[in-house]
Amino acid sequence: MDYWFSAQVSTSADALVVAQNLSSSKDFNWQNPNRVRALIGAFARNNVSFHKSDGSGYLFLSKALEKLNDINPQIASNLGKLFQSVRLQENKQKQIAKKEMERLLEMKNLSRDLGEVLGKIVKGL
């Protein structure tokens, strides 16, 4: 099932809509680390959808990290590393992603690991 989730967002031209729909389906469980990695990780590795010029891919990842910070901070910090690919994007995308990461860094209950990962990425932008 995890491979199926991954394939849906890896090959779809509109992976963001697919990922949003799948993340709220009955077959998806935020408590299942493998399922989360399969969907969220594969989505963020889909360069076309993740790096959309409107920043919607960054918003999707940041909302997922916000949710995962409470459920499984280690998975959140591992998936937070996916923001590293932003450094290769145009300045507009960098600024949008930076804003989302800074928003996460201001969370009161931010895990130490996720904070460290995002802090390093923001400093490098």
Image (cartoon, grey):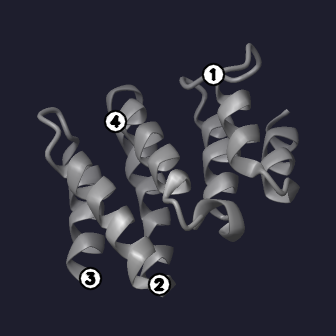
Q: How many labels does the image show?
A: 4
Q: Which three-letter amino acid code belongs to the residue tagged 3?
A: Gly
Earlier residue among tags 3 and 4: 4
Earlier residue among tags 3 and 1: 1
What is the secondary structure assignment of the residue under circle 1? Answer: loop
Q: Which three-letter amino acid code belongs to the residue tagged 2?
A: Glu
Rendered residue at 30%/66% (across/down): 98
Query: Circles 2 and 4: CB distance less than 8 Å?
Result: no
Q: Mark 4 points at which residue?
A: 69
Q: Mark 2 points at which residue?
A: 90
Question: Quick one: 55 or 69, which is closer to the camera?
Answer: 55
Q: Which three-letter amino acid code belongs to the residue tagged 4?
A: Asn
What is the secondary structure assignment of the residue under circle 4? Answer: helix
Residue 103's place in the image compared with 91, above or below, is: above
Earlier residue among tags 4 and 1: 1
Residue 2's place in the image compared with 11, above or below, is: above
Query: How far apart are the two marked residues, 2 and 1, measured between alpha carbons?
Result: 34 Å
Rendered residue at 71%/40% (across/down): 17
Q: Could you say which disc has been placed on residue 29 in the image?
A: 1
Counting from the top left corner in percent of width and height, residue 40 is at 61, 46
Counting from the top left corner in percent of width and height, residue 28 is at 70, 23
